[in-house]
Amino acid sequence: MVELDPVVGNTFIAEKGDPVPIDSTYWAGWETKGVYVCPRGIPVHRGEPDDCGWKCKEARAKMGYIYDKKLVARVLQVKTETVLDTRVCLVHPQ
Ligand SMILES: [Zn+2]
């Protein structure tokens, strides 16, 4: 599960040629992920269960899969595009 907090606030991004301004809000937070741990403690096998050889697989058959928790940073960008409908904005003479 990801819990996000607004940290950067609003940033106005308008590049040359953009038909309408785009407002972006950034949200940042942390996600907890499980990382595979080699049952024999071999560091290069961490996160890569397919790299374990037959000795590791024998140990894993006895101990089961072991996972460590790892925090991963996540950033979510929400873009808001405002488009004016000129048909509504124009005053029509009677
Ligand atoms: Zn291994």
Image (spheres, rainbow, N blue to C red):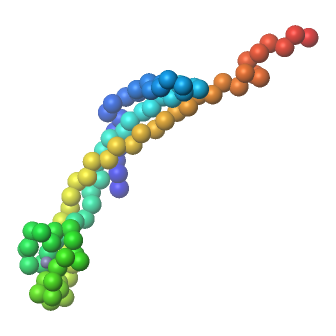
Q: Is residue 71 left or right of residue 13?
A: left
Query: How many callouts does the rendering have?
Result: 0
Residue nearest the viewer, comparing 65 with 20: 20
Residue 45 against residue 62 in the figure, above or below: above
The x, y position of residue 55, in whole percent, is: 11, 87
Residue furthest to the top in view is 93
Which residue is outermost to the front? 17
- Would residue 63 be visible to someone looking at this image? no
- Say if 61 sits above or below 81 in the image: below
Left or right, residue 57 beside residue 76: left
Question: Residue 46: where, in percent of width, then height?
Answer: 16, 68
Q: Quadrant of the C terminus?
A: top right
On the rendering, which quadrant does ligand 1 occupy? bottom left
Quarter of image, res 32: bottom left
Quadrant into which the N terminus falls: bottom left
Asked whether residue 92 appears in the rendered view, the answer is yes
Picture coordinates of residue 48, whole percent (x, y)? 21, 71
Q: Position of residue 63 (x, y in %)?
A: 15, 84
**Residue at (52, 33) in percent of width and height:** 80
| Residue pictured at 8% horizontal, 78% vertical | 40
Which quadrant would residue 27 be assigned to in this image?
top left
Residue located 29% across and 53% down the image? 31
* Residue 20 versus residue 54 in the image, above or below: above
